[in-house]
Image: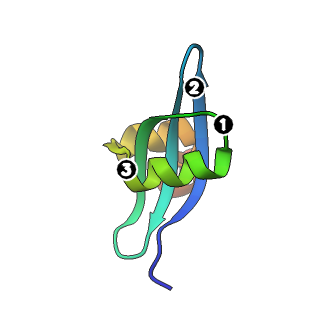
Amino acid sequence: MNEMKVLDVRWFSGTSCVGIVRVDMPYEGIKYFISGCTGQDEEVDKEHIAAWGATFPNDVGDMLFGSQRKTHGIS
């Protein structure tokens, strides 16, 4: 199966909704994407962000999602 898989998401909302998704890309590994979304349907919003969102820096995404502990041995 050669599809990207959304692993996790972080939501930021106030008067609008913004999401950052952690995605496992088939050939590139873990990538992060950020975008505004409707906030009406979580699954649709996650897929929209993964497909159309702007790339988000991996080092910042790792810190935001707590992935550094797993990938860099930090406890």
- Classify 33 as above or below 15: below
What whole-number distance in Å separates the C-alpha atoms at marks 3 and 2?
A: 18 Å
In percent of the image, x 47 and y 75: which residue is there? 3
Please report whichever mark, 3 or 1, sits nearer to the chain's N-terminal start.
Answer: 1
Residue that numbered label 3 is attached to? 52
Q: Is residue 18 visible?
A: yes
The reply to whether the C-beta atoms of the residues labelled 2 and 1 are less than 8 Å apart is no
To which quarter of the image does residue 59 belong? Answer: top left
Mark 1 surroundings: few (<14), some (14-19) or many (≥20) residues within 10 A: few
Q: Number of callouts in the render?
A: 3
User: Taking 4 as reference, is 20 above or below it?
Assistant: above
Q: Residues within 10 Å of mark 2 (few under 14, many from 20)?
A: few
Q: In the visual, does 43 lie left or right of 26? A: right
Residue 25 % position (x, y): 42, 68
Does dot 2 land on a helix, a strand or a loop?
strand
Instruction: Report whether residue 75 is seen.
Output: no
Tell me the SS state at disc 3. Answer: helix
Name the residue type under label 3: Trp
Measure how far apart labels 2 and 1 are at the Cα level.
Answer: 14 Å
Q: CA distance from mark 3 to mark 1?
A: 17 Å
Q: Residue at x 67, y 43 (%)?
A: 41
Amino acid at circle 1: Gln
Mark in the foreground, 3 or 2: 3
Residue depicted at x 60% and y 51%: 44
Please tell me whether mark 3 or mark 1 is closer to you in this view. Answer: 1
Q: Amino acid at mark 2?
A: Phe
**SS at mark 1 in the image:** loop
Instruction: Mark 2 or mark 1: name the one nearer the start of the chain.
Output: 2
Q: Nearer the viewer, mark 2 or mark 1?
A: 1
Please name the residue that numbered disc 2 is placed on: 12
